Every structure is written in C-alpha cells, then in structure tokens.
Amino acid sequence: MITRENVVELARLEDASGCTVSFYFQPGIPQNKSHREEAILVKDLVRDALPQSEKSKCAGEDLERILGMAEQLQGNRRQAKAVFACATQNFWREYDLPPRLAGSKLVIGKRFHLRPLTVIADLLPRVCIALAGRTTVRLFELWMGEIKETEKFVSQLPRRGRSDGFAGYDAGHAERHVDHETMLHFKKLANRLRIRQERVGFDRLILGCRDGIWPLLEPHLHPYAKQRLIGRFSFDPATAGVEEVRQECERILKEFREKRYRELFAKVVGEAKANGHGALGIKRVLRSIETGEVQTLLLGQNFAAPASECRNCGHIEPLKVNIACPSCGSETRTIEDVTDALLGSAVRNGIEIIHVAPDPEFERIGNVAALLRFRADHNTNVALQHVTVS
C-alpha cells in the first residue's frame, strides 16, 4: 500500500518536457472468467494517450511498459492499481490501492496526477481503534479500507478473599488494590497508543468501551491521542467481531467528515468575510498557498480551472492569455487544469486536503477554499506600522 512519504515523493517530481505518466486502474466486475475486458480497457487508454505521447516524444517507452501490464492486471486480487512513471528521470513506481477509484484513467503532463490519491487519503485515513475493557484491550488498524487486529493484552486483576477481615479493613484494602491495578491497566493502554503513534502513526483514533470505562480511561490519554480522537462506541472487547468493529468505525468516520466539513466551511466563509483567516476562490487560494498561509485546503469534487504558470519561477495565476509573469516578468505557459499543481503544492507543504462532495453553496464560492494559519498581508501591515511609529 502507498504511504504518505510515497505521495510526497510523487508531488516533488516535475518534468518540464511534460513526460510524467499517471496510470490508475480500477477493477470492474468481470463479465467472464478471462477478464479480457480489463486488458482491452488498458489498451484503449494507452491508444488514446499516444497522440500526446508522440507530441512530447518522451512518454512512449512508459506507455509501452503499461501496455505490457495489461494481461497481468486481470483481476489484480480485486485491488486497484496505480503506476507513476517518467522515462526522462528514470522513474517508475507501482502501488496497489483499495478498489475505491472513480474509474481507470491515464494522464500525461508536467506533474503526476495526484487527485485520486488525495481523495483516497481523505476518505480512508489511517485509523487506530482501541477496544478497552477493565481487563482486556484489543488494538486494530483501519487503513486503505483494510482492517486488522494488531495487538491484544489482558491484565489480571487481584481476586478478593472470602473474608473482609477486621472491621472491613481487608475489603477496603482489596478494593483500593483493584482500583490501582485498573488504573495501571489503562495507563498501559495509553502508553501503547503513544508507542504506536511514534512507530507507525495514525490520523484518527476511535475508542470502543462501555460508558463506565471512559471516565477511568480518559485522564490517562496523552494529548496527541485526545487530539486525534473522533468518536466512541460501546463494545465488549472480548466478544467484538472484526466486521462489527469496521462497520462502527466507518459510521463514525463518515459522521465526523460530514460534521467537520460543515464546521470548516462555515468558519472559512466567516473568516473570509471578516478579512481574516479564510480564502475563497482560486485566485485567493493560489496566493495563500504560495505565501505559505494555508492550513487546510477544501477542494470541490468537480473543481477544474485553467491557469497561467511562469516557465521561470513557477508562479501560477488564474488564466490570463499572453501575459508576463507578475513576479519575475518571464514568459508564462497555459495549464488546462490547475488542480494537479494545486494538490502537488499542498502535499509538499503538508497541507491538509479535504475533498468536498458536490455542494451548491460551495460551488457558488468557486469550488475551492482554504483555512489559513495566518495572513501574510496582515503581518506586513503590522511591520510597516511599527516602522512608521518608530
């Protein structure tokens, strides 16, 4: 499976001659056991890309290699496939993906086509799931649509004796001892979550526990775990099935995404209207990404827009024909769709990307927006005022 580091590597590679090849294969439902329709689909995609390949005179070798994969993709263990290649830079990467792509496609250009990958990363984040009981803990990982149990441990609590002893002293002592062991049990879980974050990392945390367990567990969670916690559900860790856990977690993830989008959208619009930490529309968003202001990028599913890119410094502006670069005065070139440039910059700079389902309100503001960490122009104005006063 592809990692975040792999996606960053893809975002960093650009080829001025326009020779990058991005190939996505989404397995369909086979009409017969031979899977011949899948091989035919790949051949059709390559054939349609050949005119552009001949124009750039550099992607032909990679297209031939992809064509040679057509027969191997039969079924592909019901997984999607992604290939990223650039012959001029001796670059070739293959990745298996969850079968959640919108469809198969082949794109040739200056940059790799990353939108399908960022959509998957948004919809299928790496989730750590902890089922916690008083004595039993089970940890799961849900990532790229696959769930697996990664760890289980059981803490043995001391048994009480038959007698409470003199004046009930022994009973009180035993109860305090049990409470202490329970506290150590939940501290152990909190520590395992910390170690997992350090070694593997996870984007979201979901807890499965009884309501009475949460007040005992919550004080021991590290701040990073609390920041990633998006929901809880009530499950018995001793009897919970893997598919039951998956269904509950996917429900929580869906509800979290929908709620978070509504809150972010309202916040970005409000900040933009107040001339604060919000950017609406492609022109404002491009400027904010270039100045390093963006914290979260919201991109509509149907977003597409042409742009002008400077051949010298790489500055990008909404499309203006036959203009010199406003930053360095050099010649510009036309980009049919700025999406790949936008997403590539976001990935390289560690910006959170949220893909927005079709929404009339979001489309009215340009189908693209951003929540900002700061406003560069505000900082500049403050600095200038300070100089003036001095």
Image: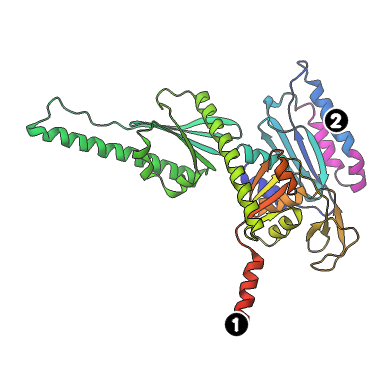
For the residues labelled 1 and 2, the Cα–Cα distance comes to 69 Å
Color style of the picture: rainbow
190 is higher (above) or lower (below) than 347: above
Query: Which residue does the numbered mark 2 point to in the structure image?
Result: 43
Quarter in which the C terminus is drawn:
bottom right
Tell me the amino acid under the disc marked 2. Answer: Lys
| Residue at image coords 67%, 67% | 377
- The percent coordinates of residue 48 (x first, y second) are 89, 35
Is residue 227 depicted above or below 75 in this figure?
below
Relative placement, left or right, of 357 versus 224 is right
Is residue 105 something one can see in this rendering? yes
Q: Point out the stretch of residues depicted in magenta.
A: 50-73
Q: Tell which of 203 and 369 is nearer to you.
A: 369
Could one spot residue 350 in this view of the protein?
no
Magenta span main SS? helix
The mark nearer the N terminus, 1 or 2, is 2
Is residue 32 shown in magenta? no
The residue carrying mark 1 is 389
Could you tell me which residue is drawn at 85 percent across and 33 percent down? Answer: 45
